[in-house]
Amino acid sequence: MRPERDGGGSNRAEPGGDRDPAGVVPVAPGGAPQAGDRPLGKRLRAHPLVRRLALLFPPAAGLLAGKVLLDYLPEPLRQDVARYLIAVLGAIATMSTVAWLGGWLGGRSSSAQKSNDGVMATPLLSGIHSSSVDDLFDAAREALFDGMVVDRTTDGELVGWQHFFHEAGYRGTRPTAIGTCYGLKSMLLLETMDPRFLQHRVVETLWRLQVPEGGWSARTQSTVGRPEVTAWVLSGLLQAGADEDRVTAAARRCIELLDPMADPVGWERTTVVATSLSVLARMMPATPFSARLRESLLRGMTRDPETRLLCWGERLLAGATGEPLVPSVPHTARAIIALRRTGHPDQAVGQAVDEAARWLVARHDLTNQTEHIRRPLLESRNESIVVKHFTAAWVSRALMSVEQDSHEGTGELLRDAIQLVLQLQRDGVWEWDNKERPIWMTYQGIATLRLRALRTSRLPR
């Protein structure tokens, strides 16, 4: 989903069926789990009938051994010794039965984890034998602490994150706006109370990373603030409870940056418009500009020639060449989330979201995508930002933002998407297709699994 240096990624995902850090059934490139990938022995052991018959094995073995002793022991031993042998065998059979039963019950409840107050929580997703969500989030939290960088080369101290986890070890590293805002958002989602997390310094670092004329830009862009980066940073400041007046002023700057006259390239991009709407809908839902962004998304839909359903592509306008818009799964998911965040009870919005969700289910594609946004500068130069779309995370969140199981196949797609999100992490850190580990992707993974855990949790009865 997020920006990175030019040429850093592939256009297709390689989920990597050999990686299964959370114990999830491997997922094929198309996103569907392959039952045949599990060994026959594991499938047999998992069968309910086999599991129940296995419980009868210890007592049956004990009775059989006792019967053999009584039938074949010499006559002098049958009366005295046999009684003690049978008693010992009975005790062994009883203890093994209890141990066997305890292990079976423990296996059934292994997916349910206890919270700090001792209340049992439901598994992350029914049928997925994943590790504890708490353990995964603890690992992510430690990775984020390890990835923090401090820059003392400027006036004052900058505390934050670079774009990738591995960059923390470089000398002279300086926090970036995108890395720092997603590190901050991740820490806030993880509800980090560790004293090592100096939230006020991270927030102040974001303010100091503004470009001279206001707003924020990526390190691959110029010193002109860009609406997509400004919106990403604003979402982090908003969640951190930053100064309201400063946040409002920065939001107004975001509106100025996205004006069609100031940024015609961004205005026709689904990513830029959806990202800006997602943030402004929370801060300024009643402003005319938010309504304008909403209408831009609705007008920019395209009809898939295969399914005949409306969805979104990378662009909202066909452009001067008149080329048809190509439907895109991550862009459709992002637009759904943005429109749902407006909370606007408009019939047109509801119909658009419903039809787009049906298209996601019909398409059932979780392949990652890479988007290049190039803007012209003076002197015949261009700036570029690479936006990578973590498709499984966006689809998961889009489906969880609408009424689940409203269409046939929604549950299967959501399950496959969650499985792939789990599969692409190692020790709480998420990896892109080329093994790079951008901070924003870990945030997407955390946000997806946290939302799923909240949606599937139940109060004790």
Image (cartoon, rainbow, N blue to C red):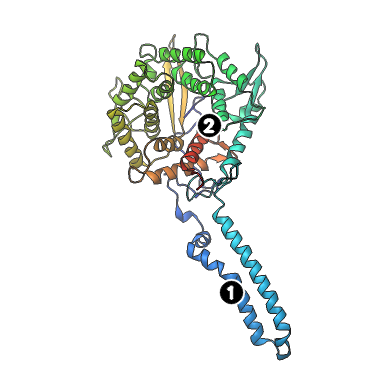
Residue at image x 54%, y 27%? 185
User: Nearer the N terminus, badge 2 or badge 1?
Assistant: 1
Residue 231 in view here: yes
Element assignment for label 2: helix
Residue at image x 60%, y 59%? 103
Amino acid type of the residue tagged 1 in the rendering: Ala
Left or right of 288 on screen, residue 425: right
Left or right of 426 on screen, residue 342: left
Work out whether residue 345 or residue 299 is closer to the camera in this orientation and state it: 345
Residue at image x 28%, y 39%? 307
Which residue lies under the disc numbered 1? 60
Circle 2 packing at 10 Å, graded few (<14), some (14-19), many (20+), is many
- Is the residue 450 above or below the residue 73 in the image? above
Circle 1 packing at 10 Å, graded few (<14), some (14-19), many (20+), is few
Residue at image x 52%, y 63%? 51
- Quadrant for residue 346, please give it: top left
Q: x%, y% of residue 76?
A: 73, 90
- Is the residue 129 above or below the residue 328 in the image? below
Q: x%, y% of residue 340?
A: 38, 30
Work out whether residue 92 or residue 425 is closer to the camera in this orientation and state it: 92
Kindly report the distance in space between the C-alpha atoms of the residues bearing marks 2 and 1.
Answer: 53 Å
Amino acid type of the residue tagged 2 in the rendering: Tyr
Residue 432 in view here: no
Q: x%, y% of residue 343?
A: 37, 27
Name the disc covering residue 373, or none. Answer: none
- Is the residue 14 above or below the residue 103 in the image? above
Q: Residue furthest bottom?
A: 75
Which residue lies under the disc numbered 2? 443
Work out whether residue 233 or residue 149 is closer to the camera in this orientation and state it: 233
**Mark nearer the viewer, 2 or 1:** 1
